[in-house]
Image (cartoon, rainbow, N blue to C red):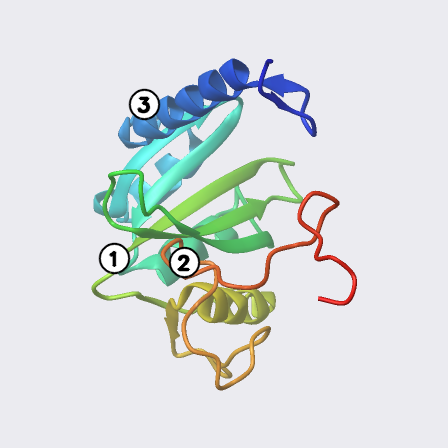
Amino acid sequence: MVDVDVRLGLSGSDLAIRDRTFKADLARRGESNLTADESPEVKALVDAGYGAEIVASKRFRGQDFITVKKERIVGLLTVLRDHASLEYKLVSDILGVDLLGFETEPRFEVVYSLYSLKTYRRIVVKAQVGEDDPTIDTTSGVWPAAEWPEREIYDMLGITFNHHADLRRILMPDDWVGHPLRKDFPLGGEEVEFSHNVREQGK
């Protein structure tokens, strides 16, 4: 009998191929193949003195990604927001990523998805955050809307945002121990009952 993922309509072989492809794509994340001539964002950052902060820059499936060091994240994002030819005034999302298990360092990333209402371009900026010092400066001074997703990242992944005006849990109780979206967080809970494992009546 073929092992089939009913939800996706994929066989076990399909899933294995997809998994290998995804990890291979991720393994290429360190490749730097966007130059200042190819990317106006990279050029703006280099011209503003942030070239040394760029760890990697690439275009993958039509989307540009810039991976940066976390130390000057506020100034770097301010350049992208205020540069006359870019104007990334809208941060459409901020999220945290735990890369545990992918044999890459540092363990965490804070990902900023930006959109320009002037050029209609999108850019994804990834700031590297280490497990030994899971902190990064808040960007609420760049975009006031950043306060809420930063609180969620703090709650779910345990990344602290320096100088945040109100950094506290947003989803979990104040006395909750740990951060549920970390990949090493124990799952726990109770087994969901289905027809094959439901308890007999009266037991």
Q: Label 2, label 3: how many angstroms apart (C-alpha)?
A: 30 Å
Q: Residues within 10 Å of mark 2 (few under 14, many from 20)?
A: some
Q: Residues within 10 Å of mark 3 (few under 14, many from 20)?
A: few
Q: Could you tell me which secondary element the residue under label 3 belongs to?
A: loop
Residue linked to disc 1: 130
Residue linked to disc 2: 182
Q: Residue at x 31, y 38 (%)?
A: 102
Residue kind at label 3, given as amino acid type: Asn
Q: Label 3, label 1: how many angstroms apart (C-alpha)?
A: 24 Å
Callout in the foreground (1, 2): 2
Q: Residue at x 45, y 70 (%)?
A: 154
User: From this viewpoint, is residue 35 visible?
Assistant: no
Mark 1 in CB contact with mark 2 (< 8 angstroms): no
Q: Residues within 10 Å of mark 1 (few under 14, many from 20)?
A: some
Q: Residue at x 66, y 48 (%)?
A: 197
Residue extending furthest bottom? 175
Residue linked to disc 3: 33
In this view, the residue in front, 200 or 173, is 200
In the rendered structure, which disc, 1 or 2, sits on the residue that comes first in sequence? Answer: 1
User: From this viewpoint, is residue 64 visible?
Assistant: yes
In this view, the residue in front, 149 or 172, is 172
